[in-house]
Amino acid sequence: MKQDANKRTFARILCLERKRRCWTQAEVAEKVDTSSVNVSRWENGISKPLPYHRQNLCHVFGLTYEEFFPDLIDQLQEPALITEEESSARKQPLKDCLSHSSFHFNEPLMNIKDFYGRPREWVTLRSRLLKRSSTSIVGPRRIGKSWLLTYVKLIVTQQFTHHVHFCLFDANMPGCYSLESFMSTIFDELGVALLQISLTSSLIALEKVVRQKISQQQILVLCIDEFERLCEVPDFHLSFLEHLRALTQIGLVLIIASKRPLMDIVSEVLGEQGKTSPFFNVFEQVTLGPFSAYEARKFVIEKSAQADFQEPESEALLRYGQIQPQQWIPLRLQLAGKMLETDRQLAQYEDTSYYRPHDSTYWTDFKQRLEEAYSGAVQQ
């Protein structure tokens, strides 16, 4: 919206006062708790600040409402209807912001940069993978096992393209209704056509593939998520696991994720016979638990920068991201961050009542909403 050069408007006053103090738009944004994009929109007359930001602007620049907002003074004295143009200018940025959240709650991992924490686990997985050794990842529901597996796959795909062939399978997929169908899924992923479709023939074919990969100086990795489900299929038996173990001896790498240790799962299905199987001897178990204080703080620092959080939001994210003192679950941190980010955006583009950091009743309500959403996603 083009401004009349001779008319005193908020947009013109803001631009002049900012330049008079040699401040950048980013510096003004930080002082009044908004983004540099908003400051630019204000100076260009595209949008007007909400009451919360008007108050902050007056305080920062040391001007009265009448001095700072001569063209808005009528609107400040009595509530006026929002014009269609103003409504459109306010709702469009909100739509854009809410569709690009900095946090990922109950979403698949799409970008390596969105993965945080787990340095010990990653070092173990990487080291064992490159040594053609197998690993078992154990942890309760929603602790981040699937994200860790996907992270490993993304890293391998980007950094070891010609050295490692990585296949990730979820045993809960409809196609994994039997061991035979599971093996068929593996060969679909490998792009290998089977002349005979049976468990025995597919295991023999898998041995040939592993030997071929070794001869080509490659590593074949079979990564199985939700391993419990595979043990529940009707044709599951111990010899299948022992065949897989034999294949690890010639170069196959297994990475298996489960809620409980492999021995507990298999022995529950096969009894005492399962406990004495040599299958378990090829794995190193990696157990996932809550984030450490270091991991949680690193997450909060980096995510706060992405979401333009100030100190109150960062402190709240660290506080409400805990399930108990000094225990942070990645999923809960993502949820708390997403809720805070959404509330701040709603306050900025809709109404300031959506985010009231100095009001204790807001935080009481926030905690209740957080617990309801978290309990809906995590089995307590």
Image (tube, helix red, strand yellow):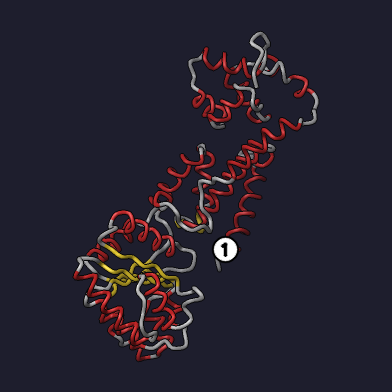
Q: Which residue is labeled 1 in the image?
A: 377
Query: Could you say whether the residue bearing mark 1 is in a helix, strand or loop?
Result: helix
Quarter where residue 1 is shown = top right
Query: Farthest residue in the top direction?
Result: 6
In-image side of 380 versus 111 (left or right): right
Q: Residue at x 31, y 88 (%)?
A: 276
Residue 319 x, y percent position in the rendering:
51, 49
Residue 272 x, y percent position in the rendering:
36, 91
Residue 190 x, y percent position in the rendering:
35, 70
Of the pair 109 and 368, the residue shown nearer to us = 109
Residue 375 x, y percent position in the rendering:
59, 63
195 w.r.t. 259: above or below: below
2 w.r.t. 317: above or below: above
Q: Residue at x 38, y 74 (%)?
A: 186
Of the pair 246 and 330, the residue shown nearer to us = 246
In-image side of 293 versus 45 (left or right): left
Quarter where residue 158 is shown = bottom left
Q: How many numbered circles are shown?
A: 1
Of the pair 159 and 114, the residue shown nearer to us = 159
The quadrant of the picture occupied by the C terminus is bottom right
Using a 10 Å C-alpha cutoff, classify the residue at mark 1 as few (fewer than 14 neighbours), some (14 to 19) or many (20 or more).
Answer: some
In-image side of 266 versus 87 (left or right): left
Q: Residue at x 31, y 69 (%)?
A: 221
231 w.r.t. 100: above or below: below
Q: Disc 1 marks which amino acid? A: Ala
